[in-house]
Each structure stands twice: as C-alpha cells, then as structure tokens.
C-alpha cells in the first residue's frame, strides 16, 4: 500500500472501516493493519486488533473445515466422485417419524459454520445452513420411517430404513456412502460407518442438518394439527411437559406405541423384559426440553 493510499484509508471513518473489514469481512488491503497500528487513535489500534482476531478466526475455521473433509478427500483421491453422507434425526422422540437425510457435496466443498446439527444450537443458523446445503449440493434427499413402521420394526431398524430411503431418493447412485455410526442394509453402494461421523465428516454433518431441520418443520406442522402437546417446542422428545400432556390429554395417532411412556399412558404395563436396553437408555422421560437430540 502506498503512502497516499494509506492516508486515504485512514481518512475513512473508523466505523466505515469496521463495517468493511470486520462486519463484512472484506479482504484487508496490504499495509492497512500497519497503518492502523501507527495511528495514534485508540479506536484505530482497537480496530487493528479486531481485524487480526477475525483473520485468526477465519484461519481456524478453514483448518476445521479441511479436517472435516478428510474422509471425503481420501475417497475423492481414490476416484469416488459422488460421496454421500447420511444421518438421521428423531430416534428418541415419543412422537413423529424418524427422519434421515443424504447429501452429496461438491469436491473440496466449504461451508462456514457447518457442523453436527447438535452443535449448531441456534435454529435460524441451522435453517440457513440447510438452505445453503440444498443450494450447493450435487444431490440431496430425505427419507422417513413412519410411526407404524417404528412400532413394527423397532426404532433402530426404522432408522436404518429411513436412511436407505434417503440414499435411494438422491436421484443418483453414490460411488461411496459415509454413515453416522452404522451401516445401511441393502445400500446400493459401498459404505463405511463412522463413529461420531456427524462431527468428523462434512457430508454426514450436512446430512444431519438436513434431517434435523426437515423433521423440526414437520413437528411444527403437527403442532398446529394437535395443539396443547408442545410438539413445536420439544419436537416430540420425552420432556416432562410432553409426558404430562400424554397423561392428561391422551395418546395421539402420531405417538409411538412401542415406547414406554406411551404404553403407560395407554394403561399398558411394560415389563422390564419388554423394553430393550437401547430403548431404556434413549427413551426415558427427562425433566426439560434441553435434552440432546439425535
């Protein structure tokens, strides 16, 4: 940056510089930080620190996203062009379907803030990520297993069925499938289950966002059909409010009758031997809607 250019930048109001290089995160011209450091105004020096902090945050995010692509990068380098990530949402709720999603991302894809849906706690941020994923993905799809299928198959196998439906709905056959923590029966492509895959694979993280946002919208729609149960708030999870509503208002057609609290509300005695260890762990009532969702 020349002396004249530096002087022109410094003549800008600090608020304008903050808007350009902190809020909007525009590229910082060479020499601007040094000029701000040399500026006697405290605000100028504080702005230099803020810009450097933003640059460091961007570098850290870039490193995180590169690390999140390591499984996909390995497969791309082996010649697998279309790598699909698959994840589900809604294993633990007492009501509603289990929803899965599959996403095939472009090679070397980066989306700032993309992470496991359980780590993206703000609903608006999750929805913004979902919009970007749908816009950018080579292919994406969702699949459901309905309440009747959950009760007939059990929740574990119903989740796998939803995953298979999501893969089959992509409109293309993936060269490889990455799945969160399991493998999908009758999957049309080679696959790999990755423990905690939604935190280790960008494709699986993208699928987790799509599955979560899709199911949350569905539960909000069901809340308008069945008011008074709080479905839009707790999304069907076994919160204290939901269990109390079951006792006071009764069981709905969308409730999973194979789950303990629903059976109890129906007056059916559930012996310990009738409840699998998985259900005993996942589906016990909890006192607040802050329960981690799958």
Image (cartoon, rainbow, N blue to C red):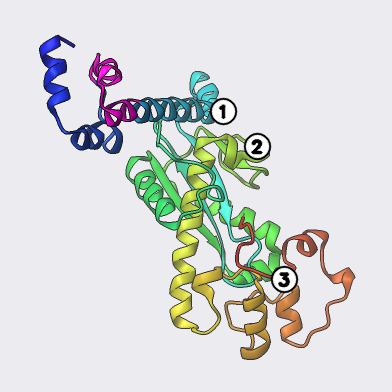
The answer to which of marks 1 and 3 sits earlier in the sequence is: 1
The span from disc 2 to disc 3 (Cα, nearest Å) is: 28 Å
User: As displayed, is residue 109 above or below residue 100?
Assistant: above
User: What is the magenta range?
Assistant: 29-48
Dot in front, 2 or 3: 3
**At x 25% / y 29%, what residue is drawn?**
26
| Magenta region includes residue 217 | no
- Quadrant of the image occupied by residue 248: bottom right
- Measure how far apart labels 1 and 2 are at the Cα level: 10 Å
Give the tally of numbered discs. Answer: 3
The residue where tag 3 is placed is: 285
Q: Depth check: give the residue in front, 238 or 194.
A: 238
* Foreground of the two, 41 or 136: 41
Q: Are marks 1 and 2 in contact (CB under 8 Å)?
A: yes
Q: Which residue is mark 2?
A: 194
Q: Nearer the viewer, residue 204 or 168?
A: 204
Q: Is residue 194 above or below residue 122?
A: above
Query: CB of mark 2 within 8 Å of CB of mark 3?
Result: no
Kindly identify the residue that appears in the image at 57 percent across and 53 percent down.
Answer: 88
User: Which x, y percent locates residue 292?
Assistant: 63, 57
The local crowd at label 2, few if under 14, some if 14 to 19, many if 20 or more residues have their Cα within 10 Å, is: some
In the image, taking residue 208 as reference, residue 136 lies left or right, namely left
The crowding category of the residue bearing disc 3, from other C-alpha atoms within 10 Å (few below 14, some 14 to 19, many at least 20), is some
Residue 143 visible in image? yes
State which quarter of the image contains the N terminus: top left
The residue that disc 1 covers is: 71
């Amino acid at each position: 940056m020349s002396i004249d250019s530096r002087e022109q930048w410094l003549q800008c109001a600090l608020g304008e510089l903050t808007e350009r290089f902190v809020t909007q995160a525009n590229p910082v011209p060479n020499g601007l930080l040094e000029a701000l450091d040399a500026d006697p105004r405290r605000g100028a020096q504080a702005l230099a620190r803020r810009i450097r902090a933003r640059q460091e945050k961007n570098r850290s995010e870039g490193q995180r996203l590169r690390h999140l692509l390591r499984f996909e990068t390995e497969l791309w380098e082996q010649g697998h062009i279309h790598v699909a990530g698959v994840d589900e949402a809604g294993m633990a709720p007492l009501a509603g379907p289990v929803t899965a999603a599959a996403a095939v991302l472009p090679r070397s894809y980066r989306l700032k803030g993309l992470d496991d849906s359980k780590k993206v706690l703000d609903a608006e941020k999750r929805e913004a990520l979902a919009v970007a994923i749908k816009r950018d993905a080579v292919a994406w799809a969702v699949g459901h297993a309905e309440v009747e299928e959950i009760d007939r198959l059990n929740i574990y196998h119903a989740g796998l069925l939803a995953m298979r439906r999501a893969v089959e709905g992509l409109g293309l056959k993936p060269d490889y499938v990455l799945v969160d923590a399991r493998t999908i029966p009758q999957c049309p492509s080679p696959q790999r289950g990755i423990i905690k895959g939604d935190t280790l694979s960008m494709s699986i993280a993208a699928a987790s966002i799509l599955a979560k946002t899709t199911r949350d919208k569905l539960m909000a729609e069901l809340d308008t059909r069945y008011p008074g149960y709080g479905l839009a708030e707790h999304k069907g999870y076994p919160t204290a409010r939901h269990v109390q509503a079951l006792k006071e208002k009764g069981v709905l057609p969308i409730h999973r009758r194979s789950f303990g609290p629903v059976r109890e509300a129906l007056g059916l005695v559930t012996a310990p031997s009738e409840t699998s260890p998985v259900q005993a762990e996942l589906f016990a009532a909890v006192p607040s809607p802050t329960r981690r969702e799958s």
